[in-house]
Image (cartoon, grey):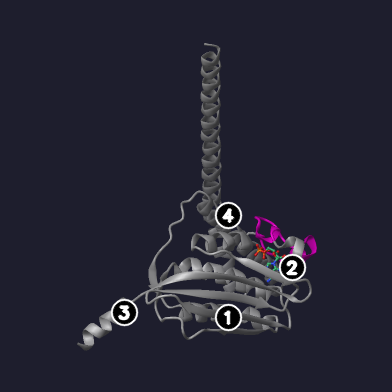
Amino acid sequence: YKNNVIRTKTNLLLKDKNKELILEKEKTEKASKARSEFLSTVSHELRTPLNAINGITHLLLEENPKKSQLHYLASLKFSGNYLATFINEILEINKIESNKIEVEHIPFNLKELLTDIKSSLNGLAIKNNNDFKILFDDKIPETLLSDPTKLSQIFMNLINNALKFTQNGAVTITTTANLISEDAVIVYFNITDTGIGIAEDKYETVFESFSQGSVEINRKYGGTGLGLTIVKKLVSVLGGEIQLQSKLGEGSTFNFKLEFDIDKNLAENNTHLLV
Ligand code: ADP
């Protein structure tokens, strides 16, 4: 009888504990949803007037402003662009964290994607006098299936950082393919620079939101401290994991591997046409 009483009491206690845990979980989920909705609303509300400010700044700059006005307009343009990037990055992180992000699986050409990114960042390479190269492994099939928008975001952020934190140096992107079957390929990506480098005790923190190398770095190079947070999340959404090796004063390498399905449709269609 005594044993039964103890068992019943223990069961009741466990049930209460379970109930408590479920309530706690529901509370956290509710709070997280509210935070996400708040961030999303605020960001969208800020974006509309900011677009107007940036648009008008652009127009004024086109209208041959006086020399004395040029300085103010340039400053307005810089701050406007910074805020726009910041808001877009907050929205992006929010989307990923609340699992609202959808991953596409569409055909694209990796070589073209990287060449386009190289053209759009060439100006920064020239400005900082950097040798800027992309080494493309020709074993990579012409058409792969993945999410090219997310891939572009990953490369834009990593290469932009590499070029920004390097002066009179070299930024090299390498791609190496490992064909694992007729339908799939693993591509290893390395983004290497010979820039200011990252101290070993910062390897983890640079990937956290709003984290920057140091106050001095922030003052000198600008930036939001959100780029690598987005990169880490996007690489993971695509099934990879980003790694960092670096030495202060010597440079950094960010690397990750991704598996891609190979798009066979094009080849098959061509054969069909030939027959
Ligand atoms: P930011 O907008 O500040 O560049 P990121 O999240 O992209 O934000 O990077 C976070 C911090 O990591 C940077 O402020 C910088 O200190 C460091 N960092 C990122 N990439 C590099 C790099 N290639 N070389 C040196 N430091 C880097």
For label 2, the SS is loop
Query: CA gap, disc 4 to disc 3?
Result: 38 Å
Q: Quadrant of residue 206?
A: bottom right
**Residue in front for this viewpoint, 140 or 232:** 140
The amino acid sitting under disc 3 is: Leu
Disc 2: which residue: 198
Among the two numbered marks 2 and 3 on one chain, the one whose residue lies closer to the N terminus: 2
Question: In percent of the image, x 48 and y 86: which residue is there?
Answer: 138
Among the two numbered marks 1 and 2 on one chain, the one whose residue lies closer to the N terminus: 1
Q: Does ligand 1 reach within 8 Å of label 3's beta carbon?
A: no
Q: Are marks 1 and 3 in contact (CB under 8 Å)?
A: no
67 vs 9: above or below: below
Q: Quadrant of residue 53?
A: bottom right
Among the two numbered marks 1 and 3 on one chain, the one whose residue lies closer to the N terminus: 1
Disc 4: which residue: 90
The amino acid sitting under disc 1 is: Thr
Residue 7 position within the rendered picture, expressed as x and y whole percent measured from the top left: 53, 19
**Residue in front for this viewpoint, 94 or 18:** 18
The amino acid sitting under disc 2 is: Ile
Residue 11 position within the rendered picture, expressed as x and y whole percent measured from the top left: 52, 22
Among the two numbered marks 4 and 3 on one chain, the one whose residue lies closer to the N terminus: 4
Q: Does ligand 1 reach within 8 Å of label 2's beta carbon?
A: yes
